[in-house]
Amino acid sequence: MSVSPELASAGAPTGFEILLAAAGKNEAQLYLLVPREVESREYKQEQRFASDWAKSATGYNVHNASPIFADMRLKKSPMELQLMQHAIDISTEAHERSWEAAGAAKWEYEVDAEVAYTFKLRNADNWGYPDIVGCGPNATTLHYEESQGPVKPGELLLMDVGAEYEHYSADVTRTFPVNGKFSTAQAEVYQIVYDAQEAGAKAIHPGALVSDVNRAATEVIKDGLLKLGLITDRDSSQYRTWFMHGTSHWLGMNVHDVGNYGAKLEPGMVFTNEPGIYIRPDALDYLPKTAENEKFIAAIKPAFEKYKGIGVRIEDDMVVTSDGARWMTEALPRKISEIEAFIARARREGK
């Protein structure tokens, strides 16, 4: 707070007198950014500071300002949307370069190197989160970050990579065939995830909830898994064996940004739309040994043998508009035919 010399010399209140008087009565209010520890590891110092003040008779009552700032961060300004779009555009180029490079790569880290190169080339701050580049069975591990496995023709490569630009993060996932062509089994799983994502997008409009998006996508996943023979009861929790996460999280200055998930959607809010199916080769081994699970395993075993090792996630960044949503990642191909056509063209022109 600054005070003009004229006011100071006249003995006018500066605001500090009121604050100090309130502190003397134990009525002063001090607002700090002290999010819950489970939300962030970035504010340890602030949390300790607030805790120490709360334990001492300073006259100041400590309040958490994080919910206020979290609400402010939910709706993005036009400038924020421009920065996020640039981060997304950089990420799009990184994905496309990787699709071309994967045809000649032997190891996941070679493909990941294309991402790092593109981020540097386009002056991104860094990645918004550690890259996920998983081929074949590695694509079925939700947060696989090692990038040390082989890249093999005939397998799918799942890439979850997003650039950070001017402190705003993108978050984009695509799953594509290393050899440029989806097999029948791969395409069947991929199409279910694609349809689920489309259903989630249609549920986005002002006044809706993030949970509505998740519900719409999940219903499609359940129907698809039942059709493939990977579950026997769509109304049970069986589908969680193959789809174990939600479809959405807020996106902004953090990749998993702050904000109340019970808030009604409003224009300017940005979040992800990312259903997936992960047929982990060892998934059935970890089910509890019960009669019900043994019956489930026996029923789905033929389908499991057909689809095991296939992992698919498609993730796009959505901004709520006045009448629905806009795909901020729309420039990156999603349809099976579009992905195959892009890879064929990119590799042909790259030779």
Image: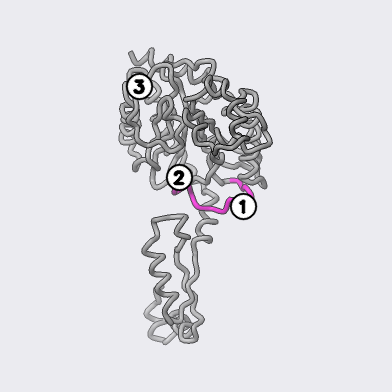
Residue displayed at 47% across by 60% down: 35
Tag 3–tag 2 contact (CB < 8 Å): no
Q: CA distance from mark 1 to mark 2?
A: 18 Å
- Placement of the C terminus among the 4 image quadrants: top left
Residue 232 appears in the rendering: yes
Which residue range is magenta in the image?
Answer: 253-267
Query: Mark 1: few, some, or many residues within 10 Å (few <14, many ≥20)?
Result: few
Does residue 64 appear to the left or right of 346 in the view shown? right
Query: Which dot marks residue 255?
Result: 2
Asked if residue 260 lies in the magenta stretch, the reply is yes
Residue displayed at 42% across by 87% down: 11
The residue to which callout 1 is attached is 263
Front-most of residues 11 and 65: 65
**Rendered location of residue 39, percent (x, y):** 47, 55
> Which secondary structure type mostly characterizes the magenta part of the structure?
loop
Query: Mark 2: few, some, or many residues within 10 Å (few <14, many ≥20)?
Result: many
Does residue 43 appear to the left or right of 316 in the view shown? left
Q: Quadrant of residue 110?
A: top left
**Rendered location of residue 242, percent (x, y):** 55, 33
Q: Amino acid at mark 3?
A: Ala
Instruction: Give SS at disc 1.
Output: loop
The numbered mark, 1 or 2, whose residue comes first in the sequence reads 2
Tag 1–tag 3 contact (CB < 8 Å): no
Q: Amino acid at mark 2?
A: Val
Q: Amino acid at mark 1?
A: Ala
Does residue 292 appear to the left or right of 286 in the view shown? right
Residue 174 appears in the rendering: no
The residue to which callout 3 is attached is 101
